[in-house]
Amino acid sequence: MKTYWYEAFLGVRYLRASRRRGFVSLIAGIAIVGLALGVAVLIVVLSVMNGFEEVLRTRILSLTAHATISGVEGSLANWRADLKKLQNFPGIIAAAPYIEEQGLMTHADKSSGVLLRGVEAESEARVVDLSPHLLSGRLSDLSPGSYRVILGKALADELAVKVGDRVVLIVALGDVTPLGVIPRMRAFEVAGLLSVGMYEYDRRIAIVAMQDAGKLLRMGDEVTGIRLNLADMYAAPRLSHTAAMAIGGGVQVQDWTNEHVNFFRSIAITKRILFVILSLMVAVAAFNIVSTMVMVVKEKRRDIAILRTFGSSPASILSVFIVQGSLIGVLGIAVGVGFGVALAVNLQDLVHGLEAIVGFKFLDARVYFMSDLPAHVRAADVIRICGFAFILACLSTVYPAVRAARLLPAESLRND
């Protein structure tokens, strides 16, 4: 004999509005909307944090190698032999020497601190591909002896220079003269502009030919270190230390995970804190189901009494109202997921449109390291949010459902 699950039928039926139950259905609709908004906000916020982390990692790695091996005293003397070993080391795609030093750059009456980086154009291109970020010029323009420089876009704006202008680069190392110590300086021609999208780099970076940097700093045939491009960037901590030991040790090793560890750690902590805080919003919305279900139970006292008289067990009555409360939760979660995912996917366009309307930039690159608001929806986050919200919705139905199951038919009919 086929069994008809009437508990589910009644649970769905009680959700539908009627003339008598208009107010109760309104309360149920408000509970659904509240839960949907809570779920949507949580999805959007976590998606923004995911997007921020991914864009930050991508932009950092677009200018920073996966790992660097540098000299303990600030320079590597026998770097050519080490470079050859590293290029043939398993797991390393490419290696490139570099020179790096802090300096001061001036143009007319303007000046700014810079991070001077000397590179070999051909080998550097195999480690880090800068071509997508070059607004003008090419890395190959930095030929030895040309004394040309590629500047970050924000740095060029600060110095009010453009391609073809000449700037003066000053380093702290000085020359002793009868008049005292004079800082070393050299004029460079601006050969190109670079925009990574991170203010920290665009405001400081100045890239020159490695030989030109070596002459300015009088490093002879030494370099600051060697930059590595790895086949698996997540293996950087292990692989970089193994490679350093293979060339004899006695060097400093740094990889992208510890060079910017504070950025990624703060993002992870912030994401956890926001999940906890915004989960309270979802919890409040889910617990609104309690008031809705209590009102439904109060209104359906007569129906419950009749069902009990016809032989329905307390467990069946319990199931009816658990089904109804769960359906409210499922509807709210479904609407929230749809709205939240749609908002997260189109968030960047919406923010740009709003900025154009109000004429105000919401994200200052000097503070947030980027001027866009990226968002990336992860299935794991959506599943976790849905599971959390559904559990709360189901828990919210327990008290009203138990109350309905305990109603006595005689008392309900007598009071009705």
Image (cartoon, rainbow, N blue to C red):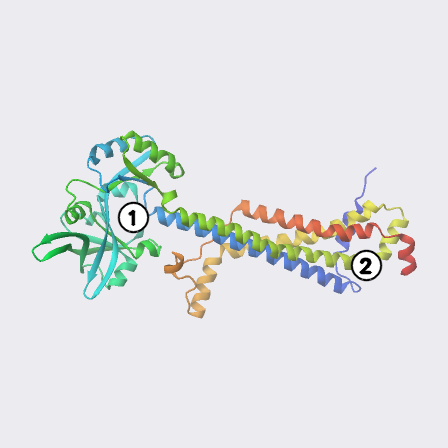
Identify the residue shown where x is 61% and y is 49%.
Answer: 386
Image quadrant in which you'd find residue 221: top left
**Label 2 Cα crowd, 10 Å radius (few <14 / some 14-19 / many 20+):** some
Residue that carries the numbered disc 1 in the rendered image:
130
Rounded to the nearest angstrom, the CA distance separating label 1 from label 2 is 69 Å
Tell me whether the residue at label 1 lies in contact with that at label 2, contact meaning CB atoms closer than 8 angstroms. no
Q: Amino acid at mark 1?
A: Leu
| Residue 130 as seen in the image, left or right of residue 330 | left
Position of the C terminus by quadrant: bottom right
Residue 188 screen position, x and y as percent: 17, 55
Identify the residue shown where x is 56% and y is 57%.
Answer: 41
| Residue 52 as seen in the image, left or right of residue 2 | left
Considering depth in this image, is 383 or 403 the residue closer to the camera? Answer: 403
Label 1, secondary structure: give it. loop
Mark 1 vs 2, N-terminal side:
1
Q: Amino acid at mark 2?
A: Lys
Considering depth in this image, is 30 or 280 the residue closer to the camera? Answer: 280
Above or below 403: residue 85:
above
Image quadrant in which you'd find residue 380: top right
**Label 1 Cα crowd, 10 Å radius (few <14 / some 14-19 / many 20+):** some
Residue 178 screen position, x and y as percent: 7, 55
Q: Which mark is residue 298?
A: 2
In front of the other: label 1 or label 2?
2
Position of the N terminus by quadrant: top right
